Amino acid sequence: MFLPAAQKGVALITALLIVALATVISVELSTRLQLDIRRTGNVIASDQALLYLKHAEYYARRTLKEDRLDNNYDSLDEDWAMELPPFPVEGGSVLGRLSDLQGCFNLNSLYYNEQPNALAQQRFNRLMQHLPSPPGMDLSQAIIDWIDANPDTTLPDGAEDGYYLNQERPYRSAGQPLQSLSELRLIKGFTDGETMQQSENQLCAFGPPADINVNTAPAEVLESLAANISTAMVTDIIVQRQTNPSQTMQEFLSDYNLSTVITDTAGLSVSSDYFLLESEARIGRARTLMYSIIQRENNGDTQVIARSQGAY
Ligand SMILES: [Ca+2]
Ligand SMILES: [Ca+2]
């Protein structure tokens, strides 16, 4: 076909445009397809991961039941406290770590049955006073006001809605027990993060108040149990209990000559009912974390009372 020179140019440009468009569309399609494949792969991997994490939970619960059938105390030399190496599974690995939630100070023990717990307050305040930079006020009062359902501010350091509604981003106090330790960041005295950072390894927040287990509590928590526990006494406990944990509270007091030091053993125990399972599945490139709070009954039966992915 004969075309004038100018029209020849137009035909060439049109042909080039069509080729270019076709290339763009095919690249787009193949990218989408690849994304779809990857997305589907991720969904499958994440389903698979959750299944493995449920198995890890089942295994942890079985370990805890066997432990209770074996004895009535809980200590760091027992099977449940052993960290196992990653377990290989199809496409990756799974690992889990059980820890005793009663080794830490449960903030929900500060207020229970609609009243502040004076003994828990004393222990909590000692814990705060032993921090590298102790807070300049009684933070137990602010936590009690956060939990209690009344509008009366505990004097002098408590805080109710009036205080929180005056913040740059206003909010209200909870009026119920803390659901997780991260909630502490909202409470007066903890909002700057510094006190929180110094104390978060010694604190926890879960369920109803639970006794502190002297076989698993870290040095800082042991030191807070009474006014005149010395650092030497705490070091002695930490060393001895590695191979010779206390089987009763009475044994704990007599073994370490603490009868006149810890005069009130309310809120203390040698066994635990609450445990935290941190489990992680690595399937392909995906990493799935799960936190489960396991409650154990006296007969060894267990139930998962809270479960979260990411943070507990
Ligand atoms: Ca045990
Ligand atoms: Ca109050």
Image (cartoon, rainbow, N blue to C red):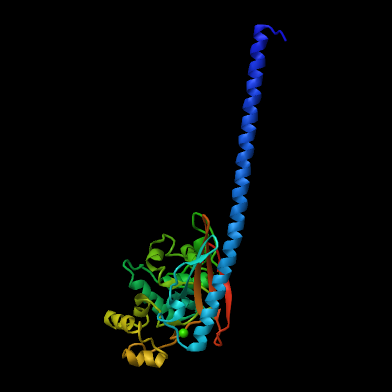
Judge from the rendering whether residue 8 lies leftward or rightward of residue 215; answer left or right: right
- In the orientation shown, which residue stands out farthest toward the right? 1
Q: Position of residue 165 (x, y in %)?
A: 53, 60
Residue 108 position, x and y percent, is 50, 75
Foreground residue among 8 and 288: 8
Residue 259 visible: no
Q: Determine which quarter of the picture holds residue 235.
A: bottom left
x, y percent for residue 144: 49, 73
Front one among 140 and 42:
42
Q: Residue at x 63, y 43 (%)?
A: 33
Q: Residue furthest front?
A: 1
Q: Quadrant of the N terminus?
A: top right
Question: Please, is residue 213 above or below residue 279 in the view?
Answer: below
Q: Which residue is pictured at 51% across the width and 69% down the height? A: 146
Q: How many marks?
A: 0
Q: Residue at x 58, y 59 (%)?
A: 46
User: In percent of the image, x 43 and y 77: which residue is there?
Assistant: 103
| Quarter location, residue 264 | bottom left
Above or below, 152 relative to 43: below
